[in-house]
Image: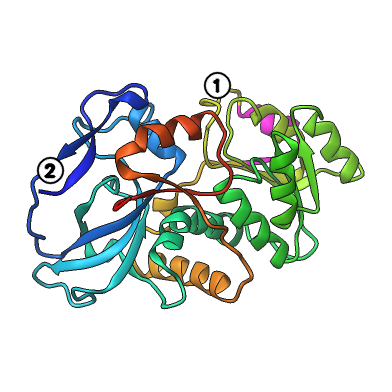
Amino acid sequence: MPKAIVVNAVGGPEVLRWEEKAAVPPAAGEVTIRHRYAGLNFIDVYHRTGLYPLPLPFTPGMEGAGIVTAVGASVSDFVPGDRVAYAGGPPGSYSEERNMAADRVVKLPAAIDERTAASMMLKGMTAQYLLRQTIEIGPGDTILFHAAAGGVGQIACQWAKHLGATVIGTAGNDEKAALAKASGCDHVIVYSREPFVARVKELTGGKGVRAVYDSVGRETFAGSLDCLAPRGMLVLFGQSSGPVPPFDPALLAQKGSLYLTRPSLFAYTSTRPALLATAADLFDVVGKGVVKVRPPRAFPLAAAGDAHRALEARSTTGSTVLEVDA
């Protein structure tokens, strides 16, 4: 009987329990995937703690890669043996095996292995919609990217640099700053010792940046607004430090007719064509070497609690995966 991480009550990492789950044949329109790796993302923490509530019990994990072992009725795009990956939900990738709607799954190109795929699908497709759809970044643009040494940050900063932008990143220490610099940042601000708003204004000659990409939330939100040029956009795509408190939207007008958006990957990949186009763009830049995905840190799937502790302690850089057969 396959095993999975199951959350029976929300709480700390200790609620991630390694349990047996009954195998169920794929329904019509589904495929069964034998996972090789599951991706670790901060949204998994939000689900585990109840910040983003899910019906109990549930298996976390929004990203995985593996092999198709069975297909349900009416599935024509996949056959057993196909190497596949997915990102964006529904949750359930912290498992040895699961059924997944076939229209949310993509085939992997020969050049991309399952470990790499599990470490980059959610983060890489997030980078794609941030830079190519939410606001289209190009030559002459200057952007600020918080947590530039993180999994999304390393991919997005390389990609933004390729698109011609000047990239300013923030990081928490010198080791992470070096990773951000190696990932395409023209300038890196170590926010533990430098006020990032003042430094951004200095680097831009007081003009500010066209876009700020902020996955940190409460700790950085006010400063992120202050880094924007008039009519600039704050793209708030996470809240690792906690949710942003309520504020008066008139503040956006006072600071220069600013834009604020709170996007999600699902909204940008809700249709099959949109999902395939987003994934294809990611596979293209990775396949060409424009974006280099560094080997991820790996934990055994059964030790998912240890992986969550490392993520919440901000001791991880880049991507982390959970290895199913470790």
- Above or below residue 109? Residue 16 is above
Q: Is residue 223 above or below residue 125?
A: above
**Residue for badge 1:** 245
Type of the residue with mark 1: Pro
The residue under the point 9% across, 51% down is 23
The number of numbered discs placed on residues in the rendered structure image is 2
Image spot of residue 22 (x, y percent)? 8, 46
Q: How is the image coloured?
A: rainbow
* Residue drawn at x 57%, y 71% as measured from the top left: 285
Q: CA distance from mark 1 to mark 2?
A: 39 Å
The one of 264 and 195 positioned closer to us in this rendering: 195
Residue 124 image offset from top left, x and y in percent? 51, 58
In the rendering, at what x and y percent does residue 31 appear?
18, 64
SS class, disc 1: loop
Residue nearest the viewer, comparing 41 with 168: 41
Is residue 305 positioned above or below 91 on the image?
Answer: above
170, 251: nearer the viewer: 170
Q: Position of residue 52 (x, y in %)?
A: 36, 31
Q: Residues within 10 Å of mark 2 (few under 14, many from 20)?
A: some
Q: Is 279 on the left or on the right of 259, as rendered?
A: left
Read off the magenta span. 249-259
Q: Residues within 10 Å of mark 1 (few under 14, many from 20)?
A: few
236 sits to left or right of 302: right
Is 253 magenta? The answer is yes
Q: With respect to residue 243, does 91 lie above or below?
A: below
Q: Residue at x 41, y 33 (%)?
A: 306
Residue at x-position 11% and y-position 60% = 26
**Quick check: can you spot residue 254?**
yes
Residue with the mark numbered 2:
21
Q: Earlier in the sequence, mark 1 or mark 2?
A: 2
